[in-house]
Image (cartoon, rainbow, N blue to C red):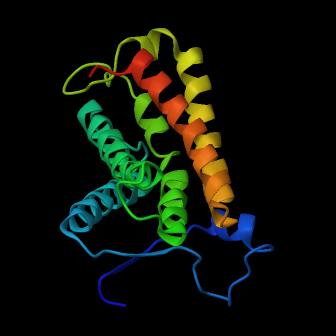
Amino acid sequence: MPGCLHVCNPLYHFTYATKYAKPKGECLVRYKWNNNKGEEVMKKILVAGGVMLAASVSATPFEKPEDAIEYRQAAFTMIATNFGDLAEMVKGRKEWDQQTFSQRAQFISQLSYMPEEAFKVDGTDKGQTKAKPEIWSDWDGFSVKLDKFQTDMANLAKVSLDGDERATKRAFGEAAKNCKSCHSDYKYR
């Protein structure tokens, strides 16, 4: 389908297959790009996908710390773009569309696992990054917030599939609180 990005994750299919069954081979997530922002995000997805592909054929995922930094920044950019769109709907600045909200929440849930490995690469605490040194000096605290982020995003994705706008907005609010907390502690503005 021209102008569409089709994202498919086998774990996603396994997790939701019983409740939201689709014909074999059909993915549950489909998002139509209908603006220039979509093209920018698509380019970042392709770059991140290329990095993931390259990482899968090499012994180590990243050749240099700069590669890991670029990878995690691309992942966070995609997360921020999708989360920002959800925030616009929650705040009423953009028309509420449960299907689009759910699709974006699914993207974020899947993307939330991408940055973690790039933080574990030696030397990624230096260079062109807004990551505070506290990430590495307080790795346990950072890991707790990162795990909560991943859990919150999975919950938001799940709740949004039920179609309950109020419950979806509550789940969004919980996720947003954790994002803000982590940014305050571990990211330079």
36 in relation to 4, above or below? above
Classify residue 104 as left or right of residue 81: right
Classify residue 113 as left or right of residue 187: right
Residue 142 visible in the current orientation: yes
Name the one closer to the observer, 113 or 186.
Answer: 186
- In this view, the residue farthest toward the right is 18
Q: Position of residue 70 (x, y in %)?
A: 26, 41
Q: Position of residue 104 (x, y in %)?
A: 47, 61
Q: Quadrant of residue 9?
A: bottom right
Q: How many marks?
A: 0
Q: Position of residue 126 (x, y in %)?
A: 25, 19
Where, quadrant-wise, is the C terminus in this rendering? top left
118 in relation to 22, above or below? above
Q: Position of residue 139 (x, y in %)?
A: 53, 16
- In this view, the residue farthest toward the front is 92
185 in relation to 177, above or below? above
At 51% from the left and 11% from the top, the residue drawn is: 138
Classify residue 22 as left or right of residue 66: right
Where, quadrant-wise, is the N terminus in this rendering? bottom left
At 38% from the left and 52% from the top, the residue drawn is: 88
Q: Quadrant of residue 134?
A: top left
At 37% from the left and 23% from the top, the residue drawn is: 122
